[in-house]
Amino acid sequence: MGDRGGVNGRRLAKILNFCWLGPLYLLGVPAQSMENLTELSLEQLMNVNISVSARRGERLQDSSAAVYILKNSTIQRSGATSIPELLRLVPGVEVTRIGKGKWGIGIRGFNGGIFTNRLLILVDGRSAFSPAKIGMFWDTLDTLIEDIDRIEVVRGPGTALWGGNAFNGVINIVTKHSCDTIGGKASVAAGDEERWFGSIRYGKAFGNNRYGRAYFKSFERDDATRPDGSDNYDQWTGSQGGFRLDFGSVEQGATSLQFNAYEGNQNEELILPAPGSGSATELRRKHVSYSGMNFLAHWEKQASDKHNFRSRFTADHSKRDDLFFDLEINSYDLDLQHDFKPTAANRLLWGLAYRLTKDNLQDQYIRYRPTRREYAVTSGFVQYEHQLLKSLRAIMGVKISHNDFTGEEQQPNMRMVWTPQKNMTFWLASSDARRTPSRTEHDVIIDFDLLNPAVQLQIRGDEAFESERLKAYEFGWRFNVSDRLTLDTALYYNEYEDLRTLEPGAPEPSTGPTPFIVPLIATNGAAATSRGGELSVGFKASPSWRGEFIYSYVDIEVEADQSNDPNADNAERESPRHKAAVTSHWDLPRQVELSTTLRYVDNIEQHHIDAYTALDLKVSKVLSPNATLSLVGRNLLTGGHQEFVDRVVGTPPVEVDRSAYLQLVLKF
């Protein structure tokens, strides 16, 4: 297709033909769909097994961390078409849209726009975080929304179990077991901002404890809109497909194999320094392309009541060519884990992991020296849990790792859990976390801006840059009041040290268009404290009406008196202090469902972003047992609002518009 963003699908089509047809050749006799989309009760939700907070199955009610579960029914009723938009429904998570395919996402503040770098993103335990960039390419994080079983979000450090990127939190996207997706499902939708999107998925059972599914999806999204009403030149198209196979039982040894491949294009426009001219800036445009594939193999066996073994291997390949990056990255992970429970009062969880990354980062606006690098992380963790009293547990753990940027790191934590009654839990936690530097903070070179016509400012990485440090203190309370009301709250106080700043160095002669360069060197030059809390209240007012209220508060103070970086204290004013949302779901007569989400987000002082209130709505009508028609409206209260302005990287300001789409879902 032309410059407006069509996907060149020939190479992807070959991969997807394999994804679609390969596993289905292995499948046996077709089975009727057994997909279970029933609504969990509030009590059942508290008993759901989660894996992200303890790296093993445990009830949400028993968790010793600030965990929130975005369950499948809420995901389906939201009308969201991307994972970042779903995360708006989670307390303590800040989501800001910067463009049609660009988001900034933070947990408990520190939302750095497109270079957000203090949280870990997992998909079924596979890390989706870019090991080279300071952050996450959110446009590459995709799957079938209807195949997400739940999204588990830990607010607060998870580094003692998951490692250095789990600094402020962990997001784990858990997809459904393929036994829960038997049969076929196809959907097609069209709208204004969402020009069109569609998907097809088919699953089968083949023999005892053997299941599989394959899927394909594609979409096209219109340009975002600028505050003056003009288009932002960021139309976005993409396609993705893959398969999942599950076979065996946990008692005998359960294996899961997953493969996904994706490709996409979007237009990009940034205000950047004019290359080689010495002039201030210019408006630059590029047709962005990205592609990748990933593979996951997971094995688990419950050998006895005392022993559970897990292993996981993942491989990830990604390519990207945009105004910032021209990159190709291959990464490989091996993770081994043993859960040992010798007595009813004692439990020992330990594991080993190895991650290898090979990258090729060619010169764009962002340059790296060297352009190719291979680096590894070796780690091990141990966590001991002891039942002090019938209602009191103590948990102690540490993760020890070695990486090629800072060497050895130790990240301990301690937790206490008190359950005075079956439906009530109090917990305390103290954590010492590290955020491991990325390639960017050690090896980057960016001709950033002109101090004057004779002096070029140049951002540089530095091998002396150390890990950022965090001491976190948390308290939480969960109370399942009744089958109609649940309460979950968490309070925290965080102390950050060695936060990244860019400190000016001595002027140097230049061979470029300006006579001199002043380097801005990545340095651990700031500290900060943050305090806040989150509240979620689930309610079921009647058999046909249920909903939830969530609220978040964060206050950040940065200490950078010794820093010469004028942006060192930006984090104080880059996040909204108050966020609240109310979701409601009604089951109406004649098989009609109505879902609404009303959100309030406080102002962002740093970027002069006003507070806003947004309303999302979805109405669904079951036309037949195999057909459902839905109408979705988003941001219905205003014509548009801004959420973030990333002036550091020259992103033009955009507004999130009012939008709507119509969707038809068919089962077969």
Image (cartoon, rainbow, N blue to C red):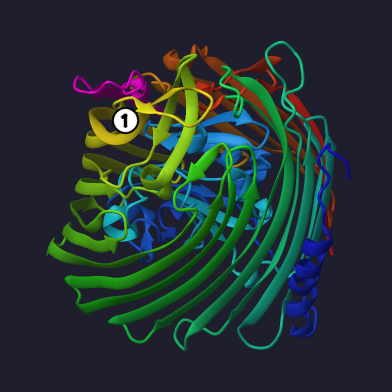
Q: Quadrant of residue 587?
A: top right
Q: Quadrant of residue 501?
A: top left
Percent x, y of residue 561: 20, 19
SS label for mark 1: strand
State the residue in front, 31 or 520: 520
Q: Which residue is mark 1?
A: 501
Residue at the (60%, 56%) spot, across then down: 148
Q: Residues within 10 Å of mark 1 (few under 14, many from 20)?
A: many
Asked if residue 537 can be seen in this view, the reply is no
Quadrant occupied by the N terminus: top right
Percent x, y of residue 508: 35, 28
Q: Quadrant of residue 323?
A: top right
Quadrant occupied by the C terminus: bottom right
Image-based side of 214 in relation to 546, left or right: right
Q: Residue furthest right?
A: 1
Q: Is residue 396 above or below residue 510?
A: below
Amino acid type, callout 1? Thr
Residue at the (46%, 16%) spot, across then down: 454
Image-based side of 515 in relation to 34, left or right: left
Percent x, y of residue 552: 39, 28
Task: Reply yes or no: does residue 556 show up in magenta.
Answer: yes
Q: Is residue 601 above or below residue 160?
A: above
Which stretch appears magenta?
551-571
Residue at the (58%, 52%) spot, across then down: 327
State the residue in front, 491 or 140: 140
Percent x, y of residue 657: 70, 22
Asked if residue 236 can be seen in this view, the reply is yes
